[in-house]
Image: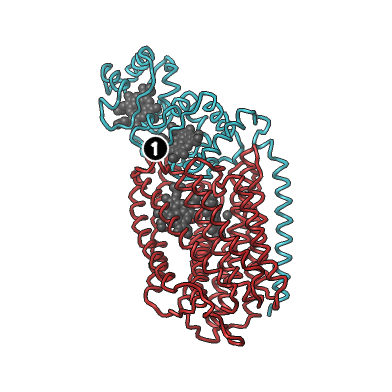
Chain colours: A red, B cyan
Amino acid sequence: MKFKSQKIAFWFFAVCMLLLVLQVTYGFIMGFARIGMDGLHDIIPFNTARATHTNLLVVWLLTGFMGAAYYIIPEEADRELHMPQLAWVQLISWVIVGVVAVAGFHFNWWEGRKFLEIPRPLDFLVVLNVLLFLYLIGMTIWNAKKHSTTQLVFFFGLLAAALLYLPGMIYFDNLTMDSYFRWWVVHLWVEGVWELIMGAILAFLLIKLTGVDREVVEKWLYVVVGLTFLSGILGTGHHYYWIGTPKYWLMVGGLFSALEPLAFLAMAIWAINMYRKKGKEHPNKLALYWTLGCAIMSFVGAGFLGFAHTWPQVNKWTHGTLITAMHGHMAFWGAYGMLVFAVIIYALPQLTGRKIFDNLSGYIAFWATNIGMVGMTGALAVAGIAQVYLERKLGMDFLAAQKETEVHFIGMMLAASLFTVGVLIFIYNFIRHGKPTDEALLAPGESND
Amino acid sequence: MLSKSQARLFFLVGTFLFSAVFLGLTWDTMRQMSKRTNAQNLSAEVKAGKHIWETNNCMGCHTLLGEGAYYAPDLTKIVKQKGKTYLKTFLTDPQAMYPGQRKMIQYNFTEEQKDNVLAFLEWVGNIDTNGWPPEPNIKPPATESTVSSKVSEPPPEKFAQLCTACHKLNGKGGVVGPALDGVGSKYDLAYLDKWIKDPQLVKPGTAMPQMPLTDAEREEIVTFLIKLK
Ligand code: HEM
Ligand code: HEM
Ligand SMILES: [Fe+2]
């Protein structure tokens, strides 16, 4: 670490870990309900568990992105963070809003729109909070000593993500309108501007870990995010097939969303090539594992499994089934979960000065989470195919078809247990690093590149 | 080889161009919106129904237009499929209609709230969804459909409102329970009467619900069933 103010990132990462554990807990509540063990129904019905599960997911990922920004931006801009005390205010208010939102879900207080369940009054607080965050990051970049493509792409990604939250706050009486603009948040986030954030973070990590020339890494960064928008913007159409929007979306959405995997493929090839060209051996091998792992798993989960159900002729049958849940898990994990893990594992030794690089538990965490996630995805895929065949193709009653998928959910939860063990080991490793300290600051002139 | 500034240009032009096309298509979609969704039918009742739908996060268990959660059935066409009388009976006590099955929340809606929710779902059912959900396109191995019941008289009102939500008769109706064609030669009158009065008593743990029927209504239904030979 080069600057004292980067230390705040540690606390964002710590919150991140806590929220992840809660998210997984609610995942298990739903998993058990799906195999008939719904003893918690009266206190935490399925819709509460689900809103909590997915919102915590989004919140921990955003918390991770914010932590990453507070770590990366000062380093890229080569100066202290603008007003670091305010970053604390931002963290604490962020956590308060998050806690209130999740608590509200348990008292039937929500907006009831998938992924945007947070009620509108709290939306405004979220906006204020994010404005503060963008101000701190923006001012740091504005007064930067060095300007880099990486920090610009990162900032543009964060800013665009904030702006795209707004269409999701408008109220419509017409469900189709409502849904149309809900996708501006959900789709244009994960298959648009979040990929900018992902590209920027990967670029930063690749520059640090492989020692490849910045100009080369950043040139390809532009190509990757260029491909993202080329396909992802019109790719939104793959959510406009069946919701009451015109028929031409079947063609537009089908065609362009089928191109979306190219962006993820480019991301993977880019990362692997930079690794091949590496000019040095960075001691933090684990960080390299997570960085390359992220680039590869995002292609599998988002690119490949997204492609599998994006053609209208396929989506007609799979739309709104467990096939979607299958893809959602691996895509979110591969692209964004692993990304946050990669930054954390890279930054921790820098922040705390404890260079525990070569440790077995770190590798166990890597393999357990990933093998666990592949298993979960496999089980959901089989359950999803069974559901599509029985319910959609044969016309079996919904609940009867669901009965047939229970066995796959037992498998899913076994795999999820392995995943959870991996997460817990990762957290054990996290805690072992101790707290961030000024002693970890690099001496002037010393470099960690 | 591609230079960095060319790569940047590719990014900027691509983003600008496709955003512009996207906004254009959005404009056209908005133009067609009211016609495709029958926006003229968005009555106060429908709007109130949407509000109930959202403030209770029904989408946290159900899908609607295929969007939402996968724990409970898609409700896009539910009013067309099962009819309002059945659905009102269901909403009064969801767990009684599906004994021992996955639980829906007991909301204790007033009659007016139930009407609103169903008006909303009915409106959704008429949206032009480009043919979604599709009809099942694989025929199950023929078993039940070999019998079809020839009865000249129309079924009793309550039968058409409640029973066909779950049972097929002459190929029409729901798929939760078995088809009722030929049921009159399977059981006798006393059994059918006992069964419909209290299914759990006859067959503990069965998924067939006990329904709010008066004695007269039940009698009428049973006399109808026994004719289904
Ligand atoms: C990291 C990137 C991605 C993430 C995090 C992600 C996540 C998700 C999630 C959570 C859903 C469910 C949304 C909902 O129903 O509310 C979804 C749906 C969908 N995704 Fe992705 N996705 C990603 C990339 C992709 C890509 C690249 C494609 C196509 C090639 C794709 C194709 C689809 C399709 C077709 C659906 C709709 C499924 C349905 O009709 O029910 N996704 N995605
Ligand atoms: C490890 C234990 C986990 C379990 C048991 C679990 C289970 C579940 C279940 C049962 C659902 C609801 C599906 C439905 O509507 O019926 C769900 C939804 C979801 N979970 Fe998980 N989950 C776990 C971890 C995760 C992780 C680590 C992520 C992300 C990285 C994740 C992302 C999601 C997403 C995006 C959805 C919404 C999917 C959609 O709407 O298509 N889950 N999860
Ligand atoms: Fe999408």
Q: Is residue A417 above or below residue B80?
A: below
User: Residue A49 versus residue A210: which sits nearer the camera?
Assistant: A49
User: Residue A296 versus residue B138: which sits nearer the camera?
Assistant: A296
Q: Is residue A216 above or below residue A31?
A: below
Task: Locate the C terminus of chain A by quadrant.
Answer: bottom right
User: Alpha-carbon neighbours of circle 1 within 10 Å: few (<14), some, or many (≥20)?
Assistant: many
Question: Residue lying furthest top in this view?
Answer: B216
Apparent side of residue A27 relative to residue A255 in the rendered image (left or right) = left
**Residue B151: x, y in percent?**
39, 17
Amino acid tagged 1: Lys
**Residue A23: x, y in percent?**
45, 55
Apparent side of residue B209 relative to residue A79 in the rendered image (left or right) = left
Task: Locate the N terminus of chain A by quadrant.
Answer: bottom right
**Residue B133: x, y in percent?**
52, 40
Q: Secondary structure at mark 1?
A: loop
User: Residue A333 versus residue B160: which sits nearer the camera?
Assistant: A333
| x 57%, y 64%: residue | A65
| x 71%, y 49%: residue | B25
Q: Dot 1 corresponds to which residue?
A: B103
**Residue B198: x, y in percent?**
30, 23
